[in-house]
Amino acid sequence: GIGIIASIAGIFLVRGKEDINSDPLAAIRKGFYGSAFIAIILTAGLAFYMLGGNNVVATKQLVPVNEIIQDQVQAIQAEAKKLAATNKVTLNEIDVTTLKDTKAFEDLGIEAEGGEQALQGIVNLDSSSLSQPVEVSGYRPIDLNDEEGAGSELSIPNPAVSSFDPSAAPDQPKYISLNEAYSGDNSLMLFDISMTQKPVEGQDVPASPPQEQMVGPMSQKEFDTQMEQMKTVYDIEVKETYPATLYADPYGAVIVGIDMKGKPVKAAKAPQAQIQIFKGKAEDLNKIDKMGIDNPDKKLPQPAASRITTAIITSQPAQWWQFFACVVFGILMAFVFEWLTDYYVGLHKRPVQEVGQVATAGPAPMIISGFAYGKESSVFSVFAIVLCLIAPILIFPPAQYGGYLLSFYGIALVGLGLLTTTGFILAMDTFGPISDNAQGVFEMSGAHHGNEAGARRVQLLDAAGNTTKALTKGFAIATAVVAAVALFHAFVEEGRLTTVGMRLEVPEIFLGMLIGGAAPYLFSAFSIQAVGRAAFQLIQEVRDQFRNDPGIMAGTSKPNYARCVAISTKAAQTELIGPGILAIAFPILVAFGFSIGKETTLIGGMEFNLVGAQALGGFLAGTILSGQLMAVLLANSGGMWDNSKKLIEDGLHGGKGTEAHKAAVVCDTVGDPFKDTAGPALNPLIKVMNLVALLIAPQVILPWEQGVLISVTVAAAALLAFAIWWSKRGSLGSEMAADANASGASASIESAGEKLQDKIEDAKDAVTDGEGKSE
């Protein structure tokens, strides 16, 4: 909504000038800046209204208890090593009592009196022997009220038949679902209790000092049952309760998250969940249990236990201005792309001026100069994207917010900020073909004869339209890159790559990156070759009409325009087959191909083949980078050649009809498929490949049989081979040679310009003969 309002306001700010020498882009630029400024103000107001004041977003993160214990053990060991180095003794020879004054000792939670032996054991402990922290990404809270959710797919032993409830009826089911066990008033909690042993009969003082202990997590009912039995020996006081939440990943692993309400967790008193959770519905497990009772000699499958991890829920508030800042960086990215495009493609800027200046030397220097500037512009575009995308990582530090989740959300907001100017960008994109067609109509009408002022106006508008079209192409590829980076994070999670990572020293990842970098080049080759084939079909059709109907050149009959339109439409549709197959088959080929013959990785008690997903991740990274560089290069170089032609037509080097203008026409012809076909097409390629990777990731990581992997790989390779064959089934040169042979011409193909000139001369002769006969 903000983008629409800002774009409409920006469009109303566009006001042209009567001065013929004024820059049409100045008015468009004013509207664009106004639109962006209004979007910033409205976004700030909306962000403060939704997230400011008391509406602070408190992000939650799960920190495994094992990780906390490991950090505290390593901290006290570091203090011990420092003490040993200072006293020049070994760890076994230090006086551990001196460590009691350190913060590391306080964090451990060991009693100050009588804790020397435990402290000495921790100092000498091999920290690698501690259980390693579990990767907690990919877990979602279990909705215990959802009858179709994870809570119904996981079960626990029925507490009613446990040893803590001797009065339980024997016909009670052995398993109940998590929903039944912990929904409603039976929610999980951690209990902080103080236990004091009751005095011996006949004495008034307690038998021992009070002891604090963490009990749970468990339901209130289970806690009451346990405490009822212990009250015969202890006086129990509940000092605090901490709510616990169950989290599950898609594969049945469970995390018990405990909200300690900001209270620090100490290693000596760290809570550990003692819950047994099994994969499967309770009714299914009860059926198996009953079958085992009825058939004791029959071997039945045992319930698969879920991996249980205890974690602490911590929260970190995110302020409204942080989200707003991410959106602002997206709007700033739009500013940067507008400035870069205007500099490299603008009619009066140095790159276009230099390309136009070398036109007297022929088309080769123009192509070389334009190509060099195009490469330069693509590099600075990458720098602009990197600077804007690194901002969310600085705004939401991963160390402070427990990972990159908010950072990637900020990257998505950068993309949203970039899209707030979409309405105005679309208007600029529409302005390009309107101004181009206006010039065509102006020239076809003959109004340009003797109307230099009008001709100059439409030429300036056409040049401005070329610049705005180049801007919108760069804008589109920027949105594709931002979206791809955000989607890449989702792919990493779906592919379970947060556990093993994506290290470049893994050969498959590097090879996947090489293939991904090559994909946009092959895709661009397909699209440019398609333009050549379609162009020749149109040329052939025009030649046939000239050959078969001389009246067209004489002006006595009309060409068959519908036939040309039909050829263009058919070519546009059929030529999409090859690039479309490439965008889908290439990621599948890489993912399943690199999975063949690879060992599986055990995660949460389940096996996964992650090598193919790692290679696919490298493939996507290569595609994103290569595609962005290639797209901006093609769009801006084509725009430079087009505007350099406009510059010459405006009077540079003598204007139209000169050798410089002919050279510029050649460059413009080369640039048209660059800026209008291959460049913009890379935008959907990047998005489609990322979406395909995201969709197939859950299947790629499964431990498929080798036959399945080979079959999918062969099928994808066959489709890719067909796409290459389809794209190379004919080229412009082969088509022209075949046409020359079919028409009985010599192998050396006559230039199209000479043939057209012959037709014009024949038409003139026909008209002259007609006039002579009439006289």
Image: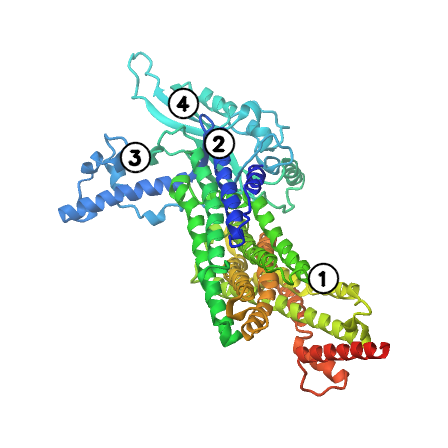
Which residue position is annotated with label 1? 573
Q: Counting residues from the N terminus, which is met first, the one under dot 2 or under dot 1?
A: 2
The image shows a total of numbered marks equal to 4
Q: Label 1 sits on what residue type? A: Gln
Q: Label 4 sits on what residue type? A: Glu
Question: Nearest the camera: 474 or 616?
Answer: 474
Q: Label 2 sits on what residue type? A: Gly
Cα separation between marks 2 and 1:
46 Å
Q: Is residue 419 visible?
A: yes
Label 4 packing within 10 angstroms: few (<14), some (14-19), many (20+):
few
Which residue position is annotated with label 4? 240
Residue shown at the point (48%, 52%) measured from the top left: 337
Left or right of 762? Residue 668 is: left
Q: Is residue 88 above or below residue 255?
A: below
Residue 551's spot in the image, x, y percent?
Answer: 81, 73
Residue shown at the point (61%, 51%) measured from the top left: 431
Cα separation between marks 3 and 4:
20 Å
